[in-house]
Amino acid sequence: MKLVDKIKSGIISYIRYSNWLLIFSCAAATIYGIVLLYSVVKTGNYPDRDYKNQVAAFLIGMSAALVISKIDYETICRLWPFLSGISLFLVLLTFTPLGLEVADDKAWLSIPVVGTFQPSELLKITFIISFATHISKVHDSINQLRTLIPLCIHGALPVLLILKQGDDGTALVFLFIFASMLFIGGLKPLYFLLGATAGASAVPFVWRMMDEAKKARFLCLIFVEKYANSVGWQQNLAITAIGSGRLWGLGYMKGGNQYLYARNNDFIFTVAGEEFGFIGGLALFAILLLVLLAILRGFLAARDLKGMLLCGGVMSMIGFQSIINLGMNLRVLPVVGITLPFFSKGGSSLVTLYLGIGVALSVYYSSKTRSHDAIFSKKYS
């Protein structure tokens, strides 16, 4: 076959078997986020580079995702020692003088050209890859303690590292990814019940160990008036901003509560609610749900357990992170410094998020081109 024919065949195959629903829904989410960021920059005291970097990160991230989607996920998983080594090394660097403290968390690095970078974002993706590989190798005996204990150690490592950084919110996301992937891997519900019971029993001890500032983040959700002018101030402003938009919003670039901190980051949802109203907030929910459903499409099309685990890990990462962030904005969950995927400012975090999307795309494309039999239509071993 001539080179031109090979290229033509490859393009046709890519168009036919790619998960275009996931590609377009991710693009829609990111573009919506850039629109909101532009408004934040122009109506507040935020630098132009916020939205400019986001545009550049979108182009780089999407390009990387499309390239990764053409790489068989089996090949990606075989590289887990190298990928995990890099991400763990970068996380460990945050404990050295190279680490930067941002919002009480020493979880950042300053990298030339790239700028500030949070290594835990990359660690999420490499953890999903390594954990999917681990579970797929031992799933036949996953409910035996000799198998489950090493899996728990594998999952505990990133959680403990991130807790050591002081980033409780990201550690919680890792915990959700860990639990979701174990569930997909076939762990019996009894173990989850035991884990939940142990976690509930530990709450009083954890509460005593927490400092007063962290306790106040929970208490302000219950005693709203008492903490209205202190810890609860930020969330009260967020609720006010969202409510002011009513059904259709105040209009694009007509909002902008200057006292609301992190409108470009943790509280980007308030901009959608304020400027585009209930309809704008609902559209944001719908786009994120569409992203999750598109990843679920790859999950259902997976040819083996490993593919399911990869898609499930990416889906749980985006889903739980979105729930926590939106809960913060709507004052139903405490503020723990979690960004909204695709929408919040952060060039390096957006690029790494698209690396995860690339892995999910790879599962769908590889499953369609290598085998048309999905896992739900045949038994796997």
Image (spheres, rainbow, N blue to C red):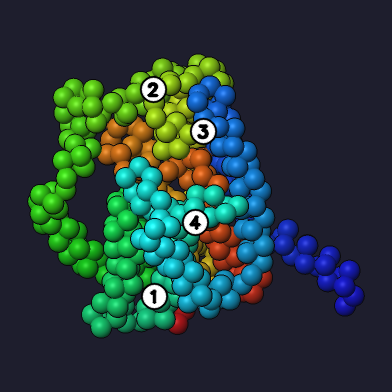
Tell me the crowding category of disc 2: few under 14, some 14 to 19, or many 20 or more residues within 10 angstroms, Cα based.
few
In three-dimensional space, the C-alpha distance between marks 2 and 3, rounded to whole angstroms, equals: 26 Å
- Of tags 4 and 1, the one toward the viewer is 1
* Image point (63%, 64%), residue name: 68
Residue 190 drawn above or below residue 64: below
Give residue 314's position: percent from left, percent from top: 47, 58
The percent position of residue 317, horizontal first and vertical second, equals 42, 55
The label shown at residue 259 is 2
Relative side of 1 to 196, left or right: right
What residue is rendered at 43% in x and 20% in y? 257
User: Residue type at mark 2?
Assistant: Tyr
Q: Earlier in the sequence, mark 4 or mark 3?
A: 3
Of all residues shown, which one is farthest toward the front?
97
Query: Dividing the picture into quarters, in which one does residue 226 lie?
Result: top left
Alpha carbons under labels 1 and 3: distance apart: 36 Å
The local secondary structure at tag 2 comes to loop
Q: Nearer the viewer, mark 4 or mark 3?
A: 3
Q: Closer to the observer: label 2 or label 1? A: 2
317 vs 233, left or right, is right
C-alpha separation, residue under disc 4 versus residue under disc 3: 20 Å
Q: Distance between the residues labelled 4 and 1?
A: 19 Å
Question: Which element is circle 1 on?
Answer: helix
Mark before the other along the chain sequence, 4 or 1: 1
Identify whether 113 is placed above or below 31.
below
Res. 308 in view: no
Residue 66, picture quadrant: bottom right
Q: Identify the mark nearer the N-term, 1 or 3.
A: 1
Q: What residue did someone put label 1 on? A: 135
Nearest the eye: 263 or 98 = 98
Q: Residue at x 56, y 37 (%)?
A: 50
